[in-house]
Amino acid sequence: MPQTSGATRQRQQIDTPKRYHVYLHNDDFTTMDMVVKILVEVFFKSDEEAVKLMLQVHHSGKAIAGTYAYDIAASKIHKAIGMARAEGYPLQLTMEPE
């Protein structure tokens, strides 16, 4: 009788997790400085890149702050909105699948 182990090796196909774009939306109240601060502190953008993205939000209505796995995107949105609300700003961020 041949010996077999209880564990058999199976190949599993692991899908890469979906990624989500995090969008910053323009409003008439959140200051440009606050948007830059959030981009630097939450999304780890350089000062130059943060200013460029802030201007894109200002002129186009929205811009992608970054693309992340779902949990990270949700966490960054939560942190950014919390920072904005703590300063009295109504900044809105959303995420959409890549």
Image (cartoon, rainbow, N blue to C red):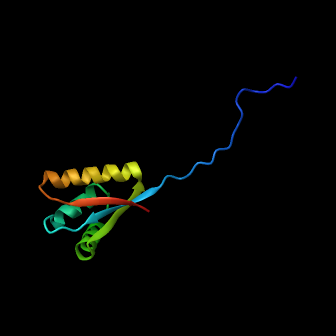
Q: Residue furthest top?
A: 1
Q: Let me know if residue 46 appears in the view.
A: no
Res. 73 in view? yes
6 in relation to 44, above or below? above
Residue sitting farthest toward the right = 1
User: Along the line of sight, which residue is nearer the eye, 60 or 34?
Assistant: 60
Q: Residue furthest bottom?
A: 59
Q: Count the numbered circles shown.
A: 0
Where is residue 34, by image quadrant? bottom left
* Identity of the residue drawn at 49% across and 52% down: 17
Position of 77 compared to 32: left or right?
right
> In the displayed structure, does residue 29 sit left or right of residue 63?
left
Quadrant in the picture for residue 90: bottom left
Going by the image, does 30 lie left or right of 56?
left
Q: Residue 74: image x %, image y %?
A: 34, 51
Quarter location, residue 28: bottom left
Q: Quadrant of the C terminus?
A: bottom left
Q: Quadrant of the N terminus?
A: top right
**Residue 69, image x and y in percent?**
43, 53
Which residue is at 75% across, 27% downward? 5
Q: Where residue 91 sits in the image (x, y, percent)?
A: 20, 60
> Is residue 8 depicted above or below 39 in this figure?
above
